[in-house]
Image (cartoon, grey):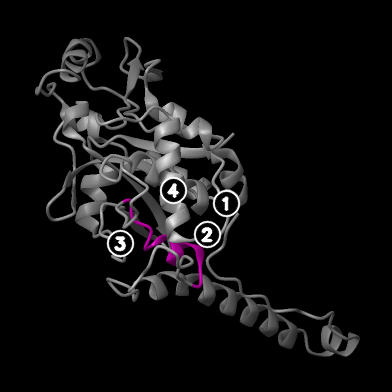
Amino acid sequence: MNTLFSCTVKLHKPKKWISKQTPIAYLLILFLVALISGSCRQGQSSVIDKLPDELPIKEEHELSGNSLIERLSYVTQLDNLSSTGWDEYRCSASAAINCYLYMGGSWQNLVSTLELPESNLTYANVHHAQEKLYVLSGGDSTGMLGQYYAKWDNRGNLTGYNVKKDNLLTFVFENLNMYAKPILPLKLTDAKGMQQAINEMYHKPILPIHPEDLRNKKKQVEGYFRKNPQGAIFMGVNENSKTGETLPAIDERISSQNHYVMCVKIDGHYYELDTWRRPGQKTLTKLTDKQVDELLFNTHNMLLEMYFK
């Protein structure tokens, strides 16, 4: 696993006179160690929140930053290379590679898997990795579509989900030795009446009687990050390509989501890495409470929990 900061305080075995005569001193040492360690962890967000909006980055430069999240914060999908041609379409590969690296995946293994000619972790090589992964997984000018269809029983309880055989996102994750688990509504209020409406909704701009059931994903999101503090969520969104603003999907249809980003949780705060940026621009954004609710907790966005196989 990759850690953003590492603070180590070596605690020597106390002498007998400490443990017998002054146990309070020993307890104070333990308290200070815990305080320092906690301080380091809480310092992660304060550092990345101060990152500049733009850096004078060149393709041949090594990824910039003291920590992994800092280095990923300037990895865009748009590049200045003449040897790539799928910049506008490869958000799926870009977000997936971000998840892979952030969660502890080996860059050298990825270089080997994708048969990249160079192994240095430069912006150019990451862009080549995005391009190679996108093409290798079947990507083309239609983008990389993917959707997961929930299944509920007669009582409205979630029982599982279906994945279409032509879901290209599956190939992206498999090429990274990863898999995704969709975050889906656990319970439907009107199971009988909603089933048909939901099936139609995947293809038509309609919403069932209780759309809040479909958007309720807060419990699953919080549970995932509680169990996987270094985890990442692969998220489908409605991106404003002109402003770079990440907007929530208006319904469950594929056509209402045109972009993929990565979401992480650091020091209790949610962040997204949106690679739809010019080279050198910061991709990391700290989400406001309103954005967290609309994009993660109460949303039609496709949310995928990421795991290694």
Left or right of 250 on screen, residue 110: right
Q: CA distance from mark 4 to mark 3?
A: 14 Å
Q: CA distance from mark 3 to mark 1?
A: 21 Å
Left or right of 98 on screen, residue 251: left
Residue 52 visible within the image: yes
Give the crowd class for mark 1: few <14, some 14-19, many >=20 residues within 10 Å.
some
Residue 252 visible within the image: no
Q: Which residue is mark 4?
A: 128
Secondary structure state at the residue bearing disc 3: loop
Nearer-the-camera pick, 284 or 128:
128
The answer to whether mark 2 and mark 4 are in CB contact below 8 A is: no
Estimate the x, y position of residue 98 in percent, counting from the top left.
44, 50
- Amino acid type at mark 1: Trp
Label 3 vs label 1, nearer the camera: 3
Q: CA distance from mark 4 to mark 1?
A: 13 Å
Estimate the x, y position of residue 75 in percent, counting from the top left.
38, 58
The answer to whether mark 2 and mark 1 are in CB contact below 8 A is: yes
Residue bounds of the magenta highlight: 66-77
Q: CA distance from mark 2 to mark 4?
A: 11 Å
Quarter of the figure with the N terminus: bottom right
- Amino acid type at mark 4: His
Q: Residue sitting at 38 percent across and 41 percent down? A: 234
Give the crowd class for mark 3: few <14, some 14-19, many >=20 residues within 10 Å.
many
Q: Residue sitting at 52 percent across and 33 percent down? A: 175
Quarter of the figure with the C terminus: top right
- Amino acid type at mark 2: Leu
Q: Which mark is residue 279?
A: 3
Secondary structure state at the residue bearing disc 4: helix
